Image (spheres, coloured by chain):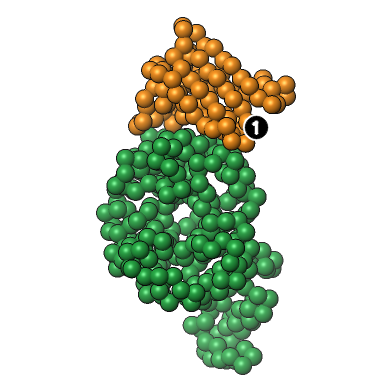
Chain colours: A orange, B green
Amino acid sequence: MQLNHAAIGGTEDSGDVLVEVSPGTGKLELEITSKVLVLYGESIKKSVLETLSRLKVTDAKVVVKDKGAVDQTIRARLVTAIFRAADMKENLPWGDL
Amino acid sequence: MSSKNRLRRTMMFLSTQRAGSIRDAYIFAPDSIIFDLEDAVAVSEKDSARVALYHVLKYVDYKGIERLVRINGADTPFWKEDIRASVAAGCDGIRIPKCETPYDVEIVEEQVLKAEKEFNRPIGSTLLQIAIETPMGVRNAYELSIASERIFGISIGAGDFMRSMHARRRADGAELYAARAQIVLAARAAGVQCYDTVHTKVKDYEGLEKDTSLIYDMGFDGKSVIHPSQIPVINKVFTPTAQEIEKAQSIINKLSNEAKEGVGVFMVGDDMIDVAMLEGAERIMALAKAAGAYKGE
């Protein structure tokens, strides 16, 4: 999936996560901040990479500011940001998520 | 009970915009959760709420609680994608807002069927709930109730209805009586369930109990909920008392025995009983069993 511009999904509220995606420079770049990074950093990274793979995003910069979100919230906010960055509003690929 | 006739005493609305509020909703044990994509979600966040909804429906275990989705109205650009996301994730049903004519149901049913085919969901597995919120909807309540085989129930939403009627809320519910009566009549004639509107004063538990007692006595099957603290108040009204259960049991047992003797009318306590009361007694027992107030056979 091609990202056309930068976009965000989520919030910095407690229990949520703010995800910012933007077009990359030919590869995936990932930046994660979280108060629970030591405990859950690997798990968050796995969720982000899995979601990017499912949506066939291979060229992007992804910044994740976690505020204690659970796994499905992290995935949902990332998907929102990607759809926004790709200007996808209809006929979304729900079956691939 | 089939999925169409399951217990729906409490149907709790939840905004899908707030991440924290939707994932743990099962701990409050409503009979149904209505994930709201409509009024509770800002226009700028409709897309985000829909994606969040998809992920909770797909990946969170709601412990058997029914999961319904209130989609946006057909006069918005959002409703078709709301249906695709909800059906793809396997929701139990769709609540259609502001229904006025059978056409409002038909166009949703068409999209639901299309989505079931697209995402390999069992055909017919997505149920429909009709929300009536206008005088025209009330007038057409019966036609709306029979507009699709998927319909399990109809509900009255008082907010928009009151505005349309130029009416004001009263503690005794007189301003809603005509609409509630039409809804319950239509539902019973069509053989579907019916549910009352929300009680908007969240901390007014006394008023909520009175309101719920009124609609329970009118024949409603349940009530919409906007705060978890309202659930036990409504459940209490909708759970038969030990006395009611005992009486219903006596009626069922006696009718069964007396029928063998060819007797059609008899007494239980001070009440004259005949076969017409069997259905009511059976309904009390079904409600008691479903609510966990009766453990027998």
Mark 1 — residue? Answer: A68
Looking at the image, is A11 positioned above or below residue B205? above
- Going 56% across and 39% down the picture, which residue do you hit? B19
Looking at the image, is B93 positioned above or below residue B208? above
Mark 1, other Cα within 10 Å: few <14 / some 14–19 / many ≥20: many
Residue B294 at what x, y percent from top left?
Answer: 67, 68
Residue B145 at what x, y percent from top left?
Answer: 35, 62
Count of numbered labels shown in the rendering:
1
- For residue B118, side relative to residue B91 (left or right): left
The reply to whether residue B260 is in sight is no
- Going 39% across and 30% down the picture, which residue do you hit? A92
> Furthest-right residue in view?
A39
Give the residue type that dot 1 points to: Gly
- The foreground one among B276 and B238 is B238
Looking at the image, is B114 positioned above or below residue B149? above
- Going 49% across and 82% down the picture, which residue do you hit? B276
User: On the image, which quarter does residue A87 sit in?
Assistant: top left
Residue B67 at what x, y percent from top left?
Answer: 52, 48
- Label 1 chain ID: A
- Going 38% across and 52% down the picture, which residue do you hit? B96
Q: Where, quadrant-wise, is the C terminus of chain B in this rendering?
A: bottom right
The reply to whether residue B68 is in sight is yes
For the residue labelled by badge 1, is the local secondary structure a helix, a strand or a loop? loop
- The foreground one among A51 and B211 is B211
User: On the image, which quarter does residue A14 sit in?
Assistant: top right
Residue B165 at what x, y percent from top left?
Answer: 33, 68
